[in-house]
Image (cartoon, rainbow, N blue to C red):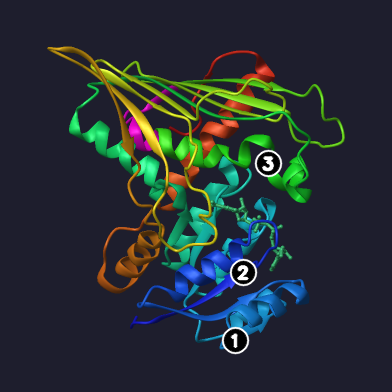
Amino acid sequence: MTSPIGCAVIGYGPQHNFGWAHSAWIDATPDLRLVGVCDIDPARTAAAKEAFPGIRTYNDVAEVWADPEIDLVSIVTPHFTHRPLTVAAFEAGKHVVVEKAMCLNVAEATDMIEAGKRAGKMLSVHHNRRHDGNYRLIQQILRSGAIGEVFHVELSALWYGKPNLAWYTEKAKSGGAFYYWGPHAVDWVLGLIPQPIATVDGYFHKLVWHEMTNEDQTTAVLRFEGGAVAEISFSYIDCLGRPSWRILGTKGGILDTGAGGAAGYEKMVRGPSGGSLTLVTIGPDGRKEEQVPYLESDWDQYWQDIADHLLRGGPVPVPGEMGRRVIGVLETAERSSASRHTEQMLYE
Ligand SMILES: NC(=O)c1ccc[n+]([C@@H]2O[C@H](COP(=O)([O-])OP(=O)(O)OC[C@H]3O[C@@H](n4cnc5c(N)ncnc54)[C@H](O)[C@@H]3O)[C@@H](O)[C@H]2O)c1
């Protein structure tokens, strides 16, 4: 394969402008070339053509599969379409980047991974939020040993209000409430605690917003083999709120309210993150508390890593197996909520 690699974005939706974001990231990566954008809605391909005048547009994925100039597709469509579109792309001989949530369950993830192996093509899940400036800073602090061994993490996205997000709130299409922000949160936690997951407990509630089929609140508690615990909560019915991140280590802790975080991430290829987090360390002189500004968010690095893999044999950023582990946590949490028992992590 030679540079630049021909790419098509599939799905140019209006809800988060994320087809635009993928197109802009590809356009900004010298080793990649945005050949075209596909959406079943002609109004959306017209919007893509306006933003990127030199591209081809397609309203049927069969045209993408048949285009010999396209080696890589980026799938930015609703969650229930990820498995069929990914498998079809592999059958057409394309490499695949697929948005989070990778798919609806572990069985679908396995289908996607196996289809990629059969085709001898790359499968990567777009867990771009690991490039957020606050998360990069948290990783840096943990690696430095400043807060010692991490034993407890709480991650929350909580508010009170009826969601109005079309297919996102239809469980059969979205996977459920946990599949919106949950994949980011689970991916973050798994990146911080390098231990096998022993068990998962899930607590799902359906109490207030009966107009939608998604749950109102979902919590997963992960117990790692080494003893660390992570609690991840997402809610449309929490009127109290909580900081986005609480991380406890044996020598300190991190508190991040999330304010000033990844704002505008769908409008920028890279950028300063604006916020800061609270770092507490316990040293010989006692407790020290400081505000540390977030690092820059380098979302474009993901795309350079994709090109480095395809052109120069570098590692696949977020291979399908990593995406499946994330989906495994979500599915195991749901099983636990239904069984009302602690469940062994699926396929760990
Ligand atoms: N990584 C992130 O930070 C992030 C942010 C926003 C959205 N997302 C993800 O991006 C994906 C899309 O979300 P969205 O908010 O853009 O949704 P959206 O509803 O705004 O857009 C989806 C688009 O896909 C098109 N589409 C549906 N089926 C298609 C098909 N078979 N072929 C071609 N086009 C098709 C629709 O017409 C629509 O324009 C989801 O997986 C979502 O979770 C990720």
Which residue lies under the disc numbered 3? 175
Q: Kindly indicate whether the residue at mark 2 contacts the one at mark 1 (C-beta within 8 angstroms).
A: no
The residue that appears at 29% across and 58% down in the rendered structure is: 315
Q: Is-magenta flag for residue 336?
A: no
How much space separates mark 2 and mark 3, taking CA atoms?
Answer: 20 Å
Residue 71: percent from left, percent from top: 47, 77
Q: Where is 161 relative to 50, above or below?
A: above
Q: Amino acid at mark 1?
A: Pro
Q: Which mark is residue 53?
A: 1
Residue 296: percent from left, percent from top: 35, 52
The front one of 340 and 19 is 19
Q: Is-magenta flag for residue 193?
A: yes
Which residue lies under the disc numbered 2? 10
Q: Kindly indicate whether the residue at mark 3 contacts the one at mark 2 (C-beta within 8 angstroms).
A: no
Ligand 1 shows up in the quarter that is bottom right
- Report if the beta carbon of the residue with label 2 is closer than 8 angstroms to ligand 1: yes
Q: Residues within 10 Å of mark 1 (few under 14, many from 20)?
A: few
How much space separates mark 3 and mark 1, taking CA atoms?
Answer: 35 Å
> Is residue 90 in sight in this rendering?
no
Q: Amino acid at mark 3?
A: Gly
How much space separates mark 1 and mark 2, taking CA atoms?
Answer: 17 Å
Identify the magenta region: 190-198
8 left or right of 305? right
Give SS at disc 1.
loop
Q: Where is 100 relative to 122, above or below?
A: above
